[in-house]
Amino acid sequence: MKNIDSYLSTLFSEYPPTPAFKHAKKRLRLRMKKRLKTLIKHGKTPSEAQNIVIAEHSSLEALADELNIAEEIISYRTGKSFYGIAQPMYSLVTQECAQKYSRALKESSAQRATGTIFFILGLAFFLLCVSICGEHHTVSIPLATLGLILCIVIGRFLLHRVKKYMSPFSMVEEYGFMADPAVKQWAHEQEQEQKKHTRTPKIAGVLLIATSPIGVIAPALLTDNHRVSAAGLALLLCMVAAGVWIIIFCSWATRAADTICVLSQDWGDDTTRPTPLLHLLRKAYWGIVIIIFLLWGFVGKRWTEAWIVFPVAAILCCALDDIVCCGKKKK
């Protein structure tokens, strides 16, 4: 395999070490290794098998479509990225592109935050309708369900608008490019500058989420009325929604820096890109926490103990952010 590894290094030496090319190199190495074993199994000597395998994979351009790097090769050969900006061979995201991406995140942060919390507010509206209407389920359940569906539709609509607005930067958010050290430094400086102005609002958002269980604990201690408890749960969800909105709205610079710094990593053989599973878990995290809280409360009838879910979830959320935002992990 040493000859094949040397051949692959030479084959890819013309191109920049972007994630796409490194992933293609790994795929091609596994393919050549499998072919080598097959040839040896059918009677070829190791030397003969290596020569055959190298001859069969002599042109990277011929394999480009199969390895999903055709566009990257064209982009490199023309000296331009998909944004039409001339690039040095080591930099596929310029500071100009990074600034546009950061500005787009800032301009869409309010809409992103609003769309996210509509899912929480829908559940709060459902519980509030049930608590107000009491025993009149023929009125409360349809009305509450309609409000919940409406909130979900509005939330999806707003997030779809954000996705469409950010579509010119989809390749950046999918870690399809790399950034040079100057861009990385600029992203860090912008993040630090923004943190000076958003530290207090973020603390307020965290406090809202941390103190939200008061909406459930107080009614549980003062009364056994289920309507009051449901209203307290709706208040809890509203406080969580307010905290989430503030945190998302104030985190656009951190999001930009996280993405750009991930792009600037040297994705070697001893690292892997952030997994889609981790990013999916990060997006759905607080929704899962709320579902656990509701199941514990409704099914287990343990509202006074269920609030512990939120402080524990806040600690675990910090750990999850460290895992996702570091941009790479050791094998």
Image: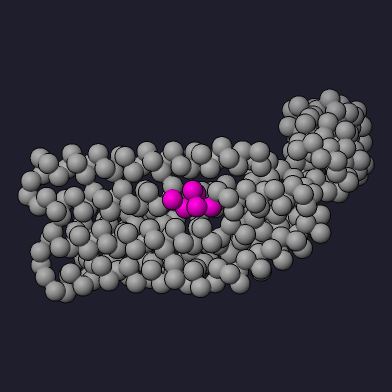
User: Could one spot residue 244 in this view of the protein?
Assistant: yes
Relative placement, left or right, of 165 versus 307 is right
x, y percent for residue 38: 77, 31
Relative placement, left or right, of 208 versus 9 is left
Q: Is residue 80 above or below residue 270?
A: above
Relative placement, left or right, of 277 versus 144 is right
User: Could one spot residue 309 in this view of the protein?
Assistant: no
Q: Which residue corresponds to the image point at 88% horizontal and 46% vertical from the top-left?
A: 88
How did the renderer colour the structure?
one colour
Query: Hey, which quadrant is residue 243 in on the image?
Result: bottom left
Q: Quadrant of the C terminus?
A: bottom right
Query: Hey, which quadrant is residue 64 in on the image?
Result: top right
- Whether 112 is among the magenta residues is yes
> Which range of residues does the magenta coloring cover?
109-114
Q: Which residue corresponds to the image point at 33% horizontal and 52% vertical from the top-left?
A: 121
x, y percent for residue 120: 35, 52
Q: Which residue corresponds to the image point at 34% horizontal and 43% vertical from the top-left?
A: 151
Our reading of the magenta stretch's main secondary structure is helix
Judged from this view, the residue extending furthest toward the left is 135
Q: Quadrant of the N terminus?
A: top right
Q: Is residue 3 above or below residue 35?
A: below
Q: Nearer the viewer, residue 54 or 219?
A: 219
Q: Is residue 6 above or below residue 82?
A: below
x, y percent for residue 275: 60, 49
- Whether 136 is among the magenta residues is no
Q: Nearer the viewer, residue 163 or 303?
A: 163
